[in-house]
Amino acid sequence: MRPLSRPRWNPAWEAARPADALRQALGLYCFACERRLPQHAVAWCLAGQAPVEESFTAADWEGAVPLCDNCAFAALSAPLPVEALALPDRELTFTLAEDSPFRYRPQAPSESDEEPARVLVEATEERSQATIAYFALNDHVPALGRDFPLEPDADLLTRDWVDPRLELRTRAWGIADLAATQIAGAEGFERATVVAVVASLAEDTGFWSVWATVLWERLGDPEVLAQILQPPGGAEAGLEAEGEAPPHRFPATRPDWLPPPGAGER
């Protein structure tokens, strides 16, 4: 889960829809599953375990996060106290070390080949596991209403239709893997151009942690990771300011997940 440094409250957000303010501050991605949010997003109050329906104030800011419908429905059906969860705006939830609280790994396809491989979220500690269960990050959860039952034996296409998170995450892994191949094969001035194109791909695809994992495993280059995934100058520098350049694609990302310069050299 992309580690976040929550920006300071902006009074202008009182006039905005809560979900729009959260998307502006934290990025266009689900706080939990990291998919790029559709036009509709849910502003979720972690402390209140419920959506924020009306505009909010500075007092509400610290506990509000943007969720996709599927993560919101999962959280609504299995409430847990905030203290039981590992949350990316409260602690460093992702690094490139083996003991990262959350890790992302492809699961091998079944022997019968009836189901393809899926990229799953793994936990290395109890609160991380509770967070995965709370948002049902490795499961299919219908977001079409509680009266829409998902049969246990429903085929994979049906499950992906009602909840595309696993499919989208797996697809992002494949795109990132191909992108890493393109970067590895580029030299000289061409490399900078390829990295810029890959950065746009990561922005459109979402799943920041998948991109970080794949690029590091394939390239081992902290500079490439920073160019694609980290706002220059730290988390606050990725935010939009009037009269300045557009915001970074992944605003509010904490910088301390990055390995030190020279690490991973091959």
Image (cartoon, grey):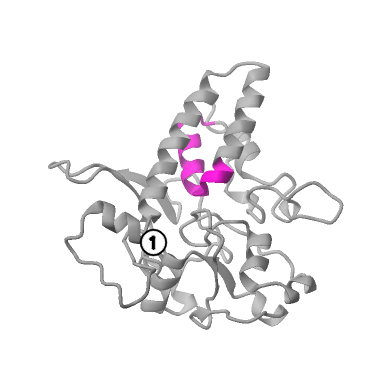
Give the labeled residue for mark 1: 125
Question: Which quadrant would residue 135 be assigned to in this image?
Answer: bottom left
- Residue at the extreme left of the image, as rendered: 112
Question: Would you say 260 lies left or right of 125 here?
Answer: right
Q: Is residue 9 left or right of residue 195?
A: right
Q: Is residue 236 visible?
A: yes
What amino acid is found at the position of numbered circle 1 in the picture?
Glu
Q: Quadrant of residue 132?
A: bottom left
Question: Is residue 207 a member of the stretch shown in magenta?
Answer: yes
Q: x, y (%) of residue 25?
A: 68, 62
The location of residue 208, given as percent across then percent down, is: 52, 48
At horizontal 47% and vertical 36% (from top left) the residue drawn is 176
When the figure is inspected, residue 10 is found, relative to residue 107, above or below; the finding is below
Q: 193 or 252: which is nearer to us?
A: 193
Please state the extent of the stretch shown in magenta in the rendering: 202-220
Q: Where 142 sits versus 234, above or below?
A: below
Residue at left offset 45%, top offset 71%? 72
Asked if 251 appears above or below 213 in the picture, the reply is below
Most common SS among magenta residues:
helix
Residue 237, given in percent of the width and then of the height, sits at 75, 52
Q: Is residue 217 visible?
A: no
Q: Nearer the viewer, residue 169 or 38?
A: 38
| Residue at disc 1, secondary structure | loop
- Residue 115 lies in the magenta-colored region: no
- Locate residue 63: give its quadrant: bottom right
In percent of width and height, residue 106 lies at 33, 43
Q: Is residue 259 left or right of residue 156?
A: right
Q: Callout 1 environment at 10 Å: few (<14), some (14 to 19), or many (20+)?
A: few
